Image (spheres, rainbow, N blue to C red):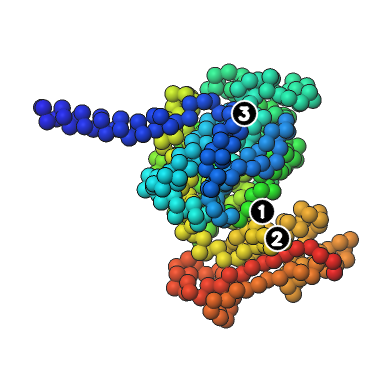
Amino acid sequence: MRFKGILYFLIVYMIIGVFSVYADDLIKEDIDYTELTKQLKMFEKEYSDILSVYSIGKSCDNRDLWVAKLGKSNIGIIIIGAIHARERITAKVLLQNIKDYCKAYKEGVSFEGYNLKELLDKASIYFIPMTNPDGVDYTFYGKKAVRDKNLLKNLKNIRVKKDPSWKSNIMDWKANIRGIDLNRQWNVLWGIPSRFIRRRPSNDHFQGFKPHSEPEVKALEQFTLNTPCLGYYAYHTQGSVLFWYKNQKGIYLDEVYDITRGLKNITGFKPIPKLSKSLRYWDTRMGYADWTAYKLKKPSITLELAWNGYDEKRDFKKIYLSVKKVPLYLLKKAIDYSKFYNVEVYKEDKLVQLFRDLNDAKIYIEKFIKDKFDREVKVFENGALVLTLNEKKQNLKVNLNIVKEKINKIEDDMNVLIMKPEDFAKIKHQIMVIKILFSFGKM
Ligand SMILES: [Zn+2]
């Protein structure tokens, strides 16, 4: 009996020990926009060798959309939080990650078995903790948070549908300050009727009058298109699940399947749909992670970090502990898979994207041209961009180049690019990097 007693004591002591490591360092403040800004600036000052903080644009009500770039390379992954206002605890979780990782990096210690120096010298995590700052501040302060007179006036036109699982009307707010759900704005099956549809601005679920209309979405879109990343992850809070499958096939499915399996082991969250490699079509639409999966062909997962009815203060530690190493795990995976992403796209000499396959790069470039000139294009006829203007074919530019940097000559370039990962390993020393350089000049 006595031995058993000591054993219990030891177990309890060990559990308390593990948790108390964080007791002093957990962020205590509520993270509204002002507090987020303050803490990010503070961390940037303290850890300037590894962290840089900058704005990628403004919200409707003129708040900055902060990115905290942790790491030394431009290649990395993007993790966004608080795109849904009431799920604001995700901003605090990501801020806590930034704080803990910076500290461990500076002290030269590993974090949960991850060697921070090794990882962050090779690649970066782009944290965007608060994608919807106006909405977040509305959930804290209601009307008082709205700065612009017209936005304030417009509030009365926004329909509020109460969800009883949230404590108050303002806490129930999910949209941006114009009543548009920023995670239903993305142009993947946009506007096709579904059971959640709302026809006008609302505290939740209204997709907007057209896709990508909101400044928060535009800013995140441009940032994502112009940053060479190998994975996109969106933090939400409802259900402790992983929405991982976006109808990928082949090597794309293998990669996201592998990443999700590890995420499941770390977090205990349930993958939806169930992890399998023989899945049917899955109806997935209008979210940030849908858009990145479809347009950029890279792993894109929505993580729901909590359960219905969680309490922000009481449950913060529990929620944080379940995901504290997730960004490092995702970064490690991106580094492991980076060897398959050998098609590099440059704009004006700046690396902006990486792809597995030349075809994926073509889709991306076509989109870029379409956005810039509002014309449909088919790229790469005889190595030049061909743009159709007023039904006449015109060559738009001369300085598009596909540069192949050969390590060893391989006969069939395209075959190399569409090979399976296991084949890659065999011929690793022979892989070539294809650089696509494009910029706009006169004919
Ligand atoms: Zn959400």
For the C terminus, the quadrant is bottom right
Image coords of residue 405 (percent x, y)? 60, 74
Q: Is residue 386 left or right of residue 408?
A: right
Judge whether 436 appears above or below 89 on screen: below
Mark 3 nearby-residue class (10 Å; few <14, some 14–19, many ≥20)? few
Using the rendered view, name the quadrant where residue 128 is placed: top right
Badge 1 is on which residue? 226
- Measure the alpha-carbon separation of dots 1 and 2: 9 Å
For the N terminus, the quadrant is top left
Badge 2 is on which residue? 347
Q: Nearer the viewer, mark 2 or mark 3?
A: 3
- Residue found 53% across the figure and 48% down from its top: 49
Q: Are marks 1 and 3 in contact (CB under 8 Å)?
A: no
Q: Are marks 1 and 2 in contact (CB under 8 Å)?
A: yes
- Measure the alpha-carbon separation of dots 1 and 3: 27 Å
Q: Are marks 2 and 3 in contact (CB under 8 Å)?
A: no
- Residue found 62% across the figure and 73% down from its top: 404
- State yes or no: Cβ of the residue under disc 2 lies below 8 Å from any atom of ligand 1: no
Badge 3 is on which residue? 34
Image coords of residue 241 (percent x, y)? 47, 39
The three-letter amino acid code for the residue at tag 3 is: Thr
In the structure shown, which secondary structural element does the residue marked by tag 1 occupy? loop
The three-letter amino acid code for the residue at tag 1 is: Asn
Q: Is residue 311 left or right of residue 160?
A: left
